[in-house]
């Protein structure tokens, strides 16, 4: 034995002497645990394992192959596929990602101005997308996958000519017809009775259209006329009345021309022209007599001469009477005509008295009937109870009506002969009859004025 464990254990062969031992095989065939060695004193010694990790995380994790030793690792793939991050690798920490603000594509066709923010790509202003193609004949829309779309519709549209009608056909604004009565100039209308109005391009009648002067009334011969309600056009009718529209007639105007003027005297009824009585209240009336708004509510008392009867009175005919009073009954105030052939004294009643004082009995009956009608229409004449010129009752009649002067008829005087009539009752009746038949001018005038006054509304004014 040579004391070297590495070359094995020597033996002795009796025939030949010492025999060398078998050397130790210390290599275990695993490169990863290092290279084994042999110590003569102790024999095989294990090797130092391989340190394959190079400390760089970016090239991956190294491994050890027992046959070949250390094997390099696989490098890290730090690209995360997000355009909104900046990717890198740190040898110690490995892969790193940082947000950026680069332009990008969010794959949405309905957005614009795409940019990265917080690692996300999105349209910065979706309202900036405008799919409107400016055509009223398409319905515009947008889908994220395909973007803007323009579908044809059948909506109404305008092609620029106010006198034509248009509609959308196959996505295009197409002429479909003409507007009835539309015009571009007076030449498109029925002259001289129509004008082309700039306001709406319509052929409008000249008659009664507002104007500032003759130039606004179209053809020569037409004229701008001042009516109560304002200036309005009148059509010339020098060629004949057939030019005049309904409600107008050909008349000689103040300017000497023949014009179609409104039959009611005014083209437009001027509002609030006057007040008058209607249905027991006071109303406003226009210049043509049309009733407008209520002016005064008479509270059921009635209305006379465009004024409400005062409290405690009521309207009876054309007078306001005290409540409880009534107009005389004609049947009671005046006997039948056949009973008036003689007075209370038996004297004949004068008939149709004239300047010569002659009359007939038949005419007397006629006078009596007229007297009875007069009593039914008004109160008996005298110093009290007779309606005055302003339509009130219970006041003293005008001096003329009392025979106090001015050519009136004095009570008891015969207008024809100047002889007194003996029966006072009959005198009153006869005076009524004479008043009705015109023998008392003052009373007749008063009666005419009152009977001519109307509470039903104003009359139309004519130019």
Image (cartoon, rainbow, N blue to C red):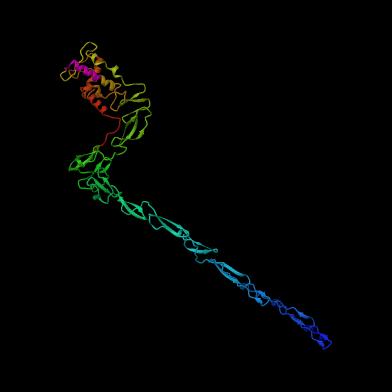
- Please name the predominant secondary structure of the magenta segment in the image: helix
Instruction: Choose between 463 and 84: the one closer to the eye.
Output: 84
**Whether residue 196 can be seen here:** yes
What residue appears at the point 21 percent right and 18 percent down from the top-left corner?
A: 366
The reply, left or right, for residue 88 in relation to residue 437 is right
The part of the image, by quadrant, that contains residue 433 is top left
Q: Give the residues in magenta.
A: 358-371
The residue positioned farthest toward the front in the image shown: 15
Instruction: Name the side, left or right, on which 369 lies relative to 118.
Output: left
Residue 129 makes an appearance in the image: no
Quadrant the N terminus occupies: bottom right
Which residue occupies the foreground of this view, 234 or 82? 82
Q: 186 or 175, which lies in front?
A: 175
Residue 156 locus on image (x, y percent):
36, 51
What residue occupies the far bottom of the structure in this picture?
A: 16
Q: Position of residue 103 (x, y in %)?
A: 49, 66
The answer to whether 93 is drawn above or below residue 299 in the figure is below
Q: Is 369 included in the stretch rendered in magenta?
A: yes
């Amino acid at each position: 034995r040579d004391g070297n464990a590495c070359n094995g254990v020597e033996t002795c062969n009796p025939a030949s002497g010492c025999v060398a031992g078998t050397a130790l095989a210390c290599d275990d065939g695993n490169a990863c645990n290092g290279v084994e060695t042999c110590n003569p004193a102790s024999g095989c010694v294990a090797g130092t394992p391989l340190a394959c990790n190079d400390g760089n995380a970016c090239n991956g994790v190294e491994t050890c192959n027992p046959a070949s030793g250390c094997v390099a690792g696989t490098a890290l793939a730090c690209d995360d596929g997000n355009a909104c991050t900046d990717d890198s690798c740190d040898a110690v920490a490995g892969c790193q990602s940082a947000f950026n603000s680069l332009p990008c594509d969010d794959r949405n066709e309905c957005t614009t101005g795409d940019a990265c923010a917080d690692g996300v790509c999105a349209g910065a202003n979706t309202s900036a997308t405008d799919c409107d193609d400016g055509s009223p004949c398409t319905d515009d829309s947008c889908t994220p996958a395909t973007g803007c779309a323009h579908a044809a519709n059948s909506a109404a549209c305008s092609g620029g000519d106010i006198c034509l009608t248009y509609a959308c056909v196959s996505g295009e604004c197409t002429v479909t017809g003409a507007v009835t009565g539309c015009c571009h100039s007076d030449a498109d209308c029925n002259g001289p009775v129509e004008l082309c109005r700039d306001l709406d391009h319509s052929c409008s009648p000249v008659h009664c259209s507002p104007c500032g002067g003759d130039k606004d009334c179209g053809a020569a011969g037409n004229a701008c006329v001042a009516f109560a309600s304002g200036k309005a056009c009148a059509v010339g009718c020098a060629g004949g009345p057939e030019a005049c529209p309904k409600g107008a007639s050909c008349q000689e105007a103040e300017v000497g021309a023949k014009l179609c003027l409104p039959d009611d005297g005014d083209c437009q009824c001027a509002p609030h022209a006057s007040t008058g009585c209607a249905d027991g209240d006071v109303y406003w009336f226009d210049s043509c007599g049309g009733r407008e708004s209520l002016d005064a509510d008479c509270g059921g008392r009635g209305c006379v001469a465009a004024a409400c009867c005062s409290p405690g009175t009521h309207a009876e005919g054309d007078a306001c009477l005290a409540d409880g009073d009534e107009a005389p009954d004609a049947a009671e105030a005046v006997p039948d005509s056949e009973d008036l052939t003689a007075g209370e004294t038996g004297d004949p009643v004068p008939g149709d008295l004239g300047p010569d004082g002659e009359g007939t009995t038949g005419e007397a009956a006629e006078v009596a009937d007229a007297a009875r009608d007069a009593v039914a229409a008004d109160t008996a004449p005298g110093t009290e109870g007779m309606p005055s010129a302003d339509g009130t009752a219970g006041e003293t009649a005008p001096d003329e009506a009392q025979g106090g002067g001015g050519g009136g008829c004095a009570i008891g005087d015969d207008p024809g002969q100047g002889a007194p009539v003996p029966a006072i009752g009959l005198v009153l009746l006869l005076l009524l009859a004479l008043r009705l038949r015109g023998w008392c001018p003052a009373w007749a005038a008063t009666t005419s004025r009152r009977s001519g006054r109307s509470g039903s509304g104003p009359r139309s004014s004519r130019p």
